[in-house]
Image (tube, rainbow, N blue to C red):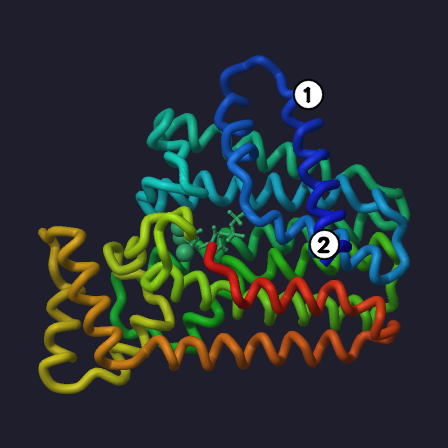
C-alpha cells in the first residue's frame, strides 16, 4: 500500500503545481475546479506504477501521468453534459455550476493541455507515446458514441456492450499502463501484457461502475445513483435483465424503457426492483470477476519479479472493492 500512497501523493502534488501555473482567464476556472475535486487518480497512479515496475525512475513518467489525468477529467466534463449528470465527486457538475458552453470549452482546452503533457518525454519514445495516446483518445470518443447510440436501442448484445466499455473506459487504463511501460523501455511482450492487464481491469472497473450506479450509496459514490436507469443506458445489468426477464417482469421492464414522460425517482425505483427480482447483480458481478481474473493472468505473464508486480496486484484488488 505504501507504494500506491507515495504515487498518489506525487500525483496530488503535480496537480497543485498545474493549478498554480494556471492562467487567469476564466476558461481555467472549471479546469481547476474539476481537478480539485479529488477522485481516485487511479490512471496516473497505474501509469507511474507500471513505469516503476519496469525499472523507471521516480518522476520519469509524471508528465504523462498528468496528461492522462487531465485527459480523463476532460472526458468527465463532456460526459456529464451528455449524461445530464448533476453531481460529480460529490459536488455540482461543471455544466450546472457554470453552463454547458463553459464545460465544452474548458474540456476542449484540457484536451490540449493533456497533449502538452504527453509531449514532455524523451525524443526516442515520443512517437510511440503519442501514438498510444492518440489511439486511446479516439477510442474513448468512439466508445462514448456507442454509449449514446445504445440509449435508443433495445437489441444491444452483451458483446456490443463489452466492446463499447472497452472503448469508452478500458483502453484509457490500458493505454496509461502501456505508456508507463514504454517510458521504462519495457520489452514488447511486457508492453502487450501490461496493456491487456489494464484493458481487462478497465472492463471489470466499468461493469462495477454500472453496478454502483444502481446499488451504490450516493454519499460515497459521489454521483447520482440511478442516472443510468433514467437514461436507458445499456449496462450489463439492463442487458441481463432484458435477456432473463419473463412474463410480467419483462413487460414491466419494457414499459419502463418506453416511458417518455416519467418521474425519475419512480422509474429508478421500479427498474431497480425488477433488477433485484430478476437477480442481475450477481450475473454482473460474476462477469466482472471474470475480467478481473483475466487481468491477473496477464500480470502473471510479465517477465519481471513477483515482488515488482505486488503493488499493482494490491491496487487492483482494492479497486474491485471500491464504493466510489
Ligand atoms: C469515472 O472514472 C468514469 C468511468 C470510467 C466510470 P473514475 O471512477 O476513475 O472517476 P474518478 O476520477 O475516481 O472520480
Ligand atoms: C464513463 O462512463 C466513460 C467516460 C467518462 C469516458 P460513465 O458515464 O458511466 O461514467 P460516470 O459514471 O459518469 O463516471
Ligand atoms: Mg456519465
Ligand atoms: Mg457516460
Ligand atoms: Mg457510470
Q: Residue 116 carries which label?
A: none
Which corner quadrant of the image does residue 271 belong to?
Answer: bottom left
Which corner quadrant of the image does residue 25 belong to?
Answer: top right
On the image, the x and y values in percent for residue 79 come to 42, 46
At 17% from the left edge and 86% from the top edge, which residue is drawn? 246
The nearer-to-camera label among 1 and 2 is 2
- In this view, 122 is above or below 305: above
Most foreground residue, 39 or 113: 39
In the displayed structure, does residue 186 sit left or right of residue 111? right
Label 1 beta carbon within 8 A of ligand 1: no
Near mark 2 (Cα within 10 A), the count class, few <14, some 14-19 or many ≥20, is some
The reply to whether residue 145 is in sight is no
Which corner quadrant of the image does residue 234 belong to?
Answer: bottom left
Q: Is mark 2 on a helix, strand or loop?
A: helix
- In this view, 15 is above or below 298: above
> Label 1: which residue?
21
Q: Which mark is residue 4?
A: 2
Q: How far apart are marks 1 and 2 (CA)?
A: 26 Å
Mark count:
2
At 9% from the left edge and 51% from the top edge, which residue is drawn? 261
The reply to whether residue 196 is in sight is yes
Near mark 1 (Cα within 10 A), the count class, few <14, some 14-19 or many ≥20, is few
Amino acid at each position: 500500500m505504501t507504494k500506491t500512497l507515495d504515487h498518489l501523493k506525487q500525483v496530488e502534488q503535480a496537480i497543485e503545481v498545474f493549478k498554480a501555473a494556471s492562467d487567469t482567464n476564466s476558461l481555467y476556472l472549471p479546469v481547476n475546479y474539476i481537478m480539485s475535486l479529488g477522485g481516485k487518480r487511479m490512471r496516473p497512479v497505474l501509469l507511474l506504477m507500471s513505469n516503476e515496475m519496469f525499472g523507471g525512475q521516480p518522476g520519469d513518467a509524471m508528465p504523462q501521468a498528468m496528461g492522462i489525468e487531465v485527459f480523463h477529467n476532460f472526458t468527465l466534463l463532456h460526459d456529464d453534459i451528455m449524461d445530464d449528470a448533476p453531481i460529480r465527486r460529490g459536488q455540482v457538475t461543471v455544466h450546472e455550476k457554470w453552463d454547458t458552453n463553459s464545460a465544452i470549452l474548458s474540456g476542449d482546452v484540457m484536451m490540449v493541455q493533456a497533449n502538452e503533457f504527453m509531449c514532455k518525454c524523451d525524443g526516442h519514445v515520443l512517437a510511440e507515446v503519442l501514438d498510444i495516446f492518440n489511439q486511446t483518445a479516439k477510442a474513448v470518443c468512439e466508445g462514448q458514441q456507442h454509449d449514446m447510440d445504445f440509449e435508443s436501442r433495445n437489441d444491444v448484445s452483451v458483446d456490443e456492450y463489452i466492446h463499447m466499455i472497452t472503448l469508452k473506459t478500458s483502453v484509457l487504463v490500458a493505454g496509461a499502463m502501456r505508456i508507463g511501460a514504454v517510458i521504462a523501455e519495457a520489452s514488447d511482450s511486457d508492453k502487450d501484457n501490461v496493456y491487456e492487464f489494464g484493458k481487462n481491469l478497465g472492463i471489470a472497473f466499468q461493469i462495477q461502475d454500472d453496478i454502483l450506479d444502481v446499488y451504490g450509496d450516493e454519499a460515497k459514490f459521489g454521483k447520482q445513483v440511478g442516472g443510468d436507469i433514467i437514461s436507458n443506458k445499456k449496462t450489463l445489468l439492463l442487458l441481463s435483465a432484458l435477456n432473463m426477464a419473463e412474463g410480467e417482469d419483462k413487460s414491466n421492464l419494457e414499459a419502463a424503457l418506453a416511458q417518455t414522460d416519467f418521474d425519475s425517482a419512480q422509474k429508478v425505483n421500479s427498474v431497480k426492483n425488477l433488477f433485484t427480482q430478476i437477480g442481475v447483480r450477481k450475473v454482473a458481478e460474476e462477469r466482472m470477476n471474470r475480467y478481473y481474473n483475466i487481468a491477473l493472468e496477464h500480470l502473471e505473464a510479465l517477465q519481471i519479479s513477483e515482488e515488482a508486480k505486488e503493488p499493482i496486484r494490491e491496487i487492483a484488488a482494492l479497486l474491485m472493492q471500491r464504493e466510489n
